[in-house]
Image (cartoon, rainbow, N blue to C red):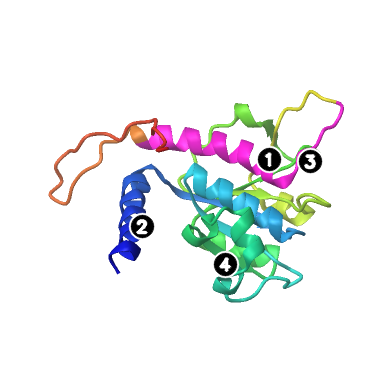
Amino acid sequence: MEEAAVPKRAARKRADEIKAFRCKHLIAVIENPADVKNIGSVIRNVNALGVEKVYIVDTRRSLPDDWQDLRDQKAMSKTSVSAVKWTFVKRFDSTDQCFDYLEAKGFTSIVTSPHVKGKASIFLHEGDYTKYTKLAVWFGSEAIGISDLAVARSEMCVSIPMFGMIESLNLGTSSGIVLYEVAKQRREYQSKYIWRNKKGERSVPLPTVMTPET
């Protein structure tokens, strides 16, 4: 009993330590992912970078309705390095359903793609991701990218500058790069505010950089 309780207490301690560094109201959305392994990679990035939640648009209904069923699959646990156990995930049957839900909650959506035309498009480093109180960042499928519908309903498109012969990145890599920049900006922005306790008294501002534990 005692041995089993030790790692549980350690996990709770770690969860308490990192709670303040999570990016509030920041959601990563994966639209029609083709491979469970890629879902696991995105979840790992989301958890590591302090993004609050993951939403998955699954029009093929290839994922179980009960997310706990997927959490228990070895492939998902392995590719996410168990991050799936610590990450909030919600699935949707369609792109419109997900957008309707996000907009009802006051979220602004941006999409990521290197090939979007006819839409406000910027390079990743040019964006200010702190001006949106609630932000959802959309990533398209590995095969066809982001859908035209998602582009039409989004605020703008963000692309990663590329300088090689191959102008594409896999979902795990691209989501890691984009979410790192977005989360970094929002965490620095959050740290500028003075957090107050229940009595309304000012407390010490959060540091902008967190030293990882080994």
| Disc 1 to disc 3: CB gap under 8 Å | no
Residue appearing at x 50%, y 58% in the figure: 87
How crowded pointer 3 is (Cα within 10 Å; few <14, some 14-19, many 20+) is rated as: some
Q: Is residue 168 magenta?
A: yes
Q: CA distance from mark 4 to mark 3?
A: 33 Å
Between marks 2 and 3 in the image, the one whose residue lies nearer the viewer = 2
Q: Which residue is mark 3?
A: 116
Q: Amino acid at mark 1?
A: Thr
Q: Position of residue 80 (x, y in %)?
A: 59, 54
Q: What secondary structure is marked by label 1?
A: helix
Q: Which residue is mark 4?
A: 71
Q: Is residue 20 magenta?
A: no
Q: CA distance from mark 1 to mark 3?
A: 19 Å
Comes first in the chain, label 4 or label 2: 2
Q: Position of residue 110 (x, y in %)?
A: 63, 45
| Disc 4 to disc 1: CB gap under 8 Å | no
Q: Position of residue 68 (x, y in %)?
A: 54, 72
Q: Which mark is residue 7?
A: 2
Q: Which residue is mark 1?
A: 173
Comes first in the chain, label 4 or label 1: 4
How crowded pointer 4 is (Cα within 10 Å; few <14, some 14-19, many 20+) is rated as: many
Residue 47 visible here: yes
Q: What secondary structure is marked by label 4?
A: helix
| Quadrant of residue 97 within the rendered picture | bottom right
Q: CA distance from mark 4 to mark 2?
A: 20 Å
Residue 188 position (above or below residue 152): above
Residue appearing at x 52%, y 55% in the figure: 83
